Amino acid sequence: MGAPSQKIYRSWPSGPPTYQQANTDGSDIAQSREWNYSLFDCCPPGTLCLKSTFLPCLTYGKTQSRSKDPNLSNFSYINSPTYFLYLDSQETIPHAFSRALGMLVDEEISPVYNSKYYPVKPGEVLADRYQTLVKVGWGVSSTVWLARGLQGPIETLENVVALKVANNNASFASHEREVEEHISTADPSHRGRSLIRTLLDSFEVKGPEGSHSCLVYPPMREPLSIYQSRFEDRKMPLPLIKTYIRALLTGLDYLHKECRTVHTGGWLDLKLENIMVSFEDSTVLAHFIDSQLERPMAFKIDAVGRPVYQSHNNFGPLKSLRSIPQLVDFGLATRLEEDDDWGVWPIQPDHYRAPEVILGNGWQMSVDIWNLGVLLWDMIEGKELFRHIHDQEGRYDAKLHIAEMIALLGPPPPEILQRYQYMREYSWPQHVRLEDGRLCETAEEYFCGPFFDNTGRFLYEDLIPDRKLDATASFLGGEEREAFLDLAKGMLVWHPDARKTAGELAGHPFLQPRETSA
Ligand SMILES: Nc1ncnc2c1ncn2[C@@H]1O[C@H](COP(=O)(O)OP(=O)(O)OP(=O)(O)O)[C@@H](O)[C@H]1O
């Protein structure tokens, strides 16, 4: 599905109806270029990156030269130290990547890959303040690099940051910066603030295709999706999962109450990839950086001449379980300042989509609670809760999704259906484009409704699968299972206002540490 054409929210033109009011009113990029290792046309990039990790003077030289000669008219990457390091490095170049010819790498996999990614190279100095070390990730609109800040003592680990270099068309980047600045300052004393990724700095760089925003963050170990894979059968120990869920709820409590911000706002929401885990021990990062010496990143040149580096994000086995989770990626977050501000456009990845989004009833903070409720199954069982939401061709089908919600939770209460009927008349302030190019004005058009008739009867009763929520938690036994279901039932509620708040849920008995008997 395509994203909304503009990132806005608007309340209803005549004032948003409350549930009560509604009740009464009834490249193809050719991937043929070879992998290679050159960086500045003179030395292998990975090696340069690694050398510069340990010998910052090597690549920092550009910054130093710039301070003497701002135009860099006489600057050369080849200076005597570089040259010797280049010679010295020849033996460390791995050859394994030659087999990667024609392969799609990292961001190239994105269906919307284009040259709008800034061509970051390892060792590059950005804005005279950060020197890139190694690429650790990518998204549909950015690449993420570990970098060293050049303004403090440059060899210390404290100076290592993560740089998110946004695409030049990424309007999300300025939005993300604004939201994150707001989050950083709303109430720094709230416990939940540390559970949300905070921005350390931001700047712009000029690339061949225009200007790119760069957002600077503390470095993190990895997304929860990778962290999970470090445990047998991808199953984290239950006490640890409980701690994580409690932490995420504390973060959401801060986000919702103090920042009046919904994490959701587009297609990329609360999911395992958007929960990052901190380093359990500073030596993990130190060893990772050291290890890059032996294992420089491979890269290729894409059809338009942009280098595409293969990210390195394996920080190795866990040394302890002392990591903490953080919510990241606020590029599509939505601020709803007033109680009667509503989001109205379609949001959330299919699997996590809340009923009020599909029905077009408008959404607020509680849409994140539904999302996290669904995510509980991914976190604990490593499997998705909703299993029948795609048609035989694998396309998302909202009526199947509603049918499965009815199976698991029972039918929606009357006030939801009344509001649904009321909101069917509502057209979005802006059309939203579907992947096939069609423009939609209403949620009903977008999600191929209607779903209920005027009497509130579901139009596709034959699609309701034979599943019950209680039967989906067989991964837990006895009291744990009951407590877990009680928690989930406070989150997976048709009526958005009846969902428990993040703050209430964080105190749920299922999430409290158990006293161990002496
Ligand atoms: N602070 C960080 N430390 C280490 N790695 C990071 C950090 N932030 C992001 N990453 C890595 O970069 C990847 C992409 O980051 P992020 O999700 O912020 O980018 P994005 O362009 O918004 O992605 P998308 O929009 O496709 O979800 C993450 O999945 C993670 O692997």
Image (cartoon, rainbow, N blue to C red):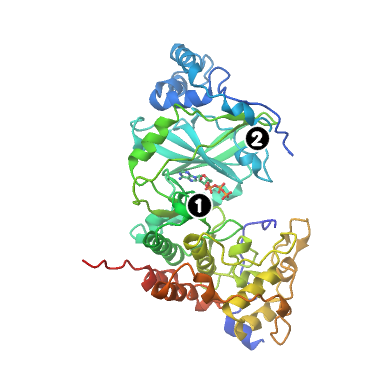
Q: Position of residue 115 (x, y in %)?
A: 66, 36
Is residue 13 in sight in this rendering?
no
Q: Nearer the viewer, mark 1 or mark 2?
A: 1
Q: Position of residue 32 (x, y in %)?
A: 71, 30
**Foreground pick, 26 / 289:** 289
Side (left or right) of 62 relative to 459: left
Check if mark 1's residue and mark 2's residue have beta carbons within 8 Å.
no
Residue beneath the point at 78% across and 56% down: 436
Residue underneath mark 1: 225
Which image quadrant is residue 354 in? Answer: bottom right
Which image quadrant is residue 428 in? Answer: bottom right
State which tag comes first along the sequence, 1 or 2: 2
Side (left or right) of 34 relative to 252: right
**Foreground pick, 438 / 475:** 475
Instruction: State whether residue 379 is above or below residue 222.
Output: below
Residue beneath the point at 38% across and 34% down: 287
What SS does tag 2 mark?
A: loop
Q: The N terminus appears in which quarter of the rendering?
A: bottom right
Q: CA distance from mark 1 to mark 2?
A: 33 Å
Instruction: State whether residue 209 is above or below residue 496.
Output: above
Crowd rating for badge 1 (residues with CA inside 10 Å; few <14, some 14–19, many 20+): some
**Foreground pick, 314 / 454:** 314
Q: Looking at the picture, which amino acid does disc 2 mark?
A: Glu
Side (left or right) of 213 relative to 454: left
Q: What mark, if any, has residue 209 been given in the picture?
A: 2
Q: Position of residue 448 (x, y in %)?
A: 75, 69
Residue beneath the point at 61% across and 46% down: 140
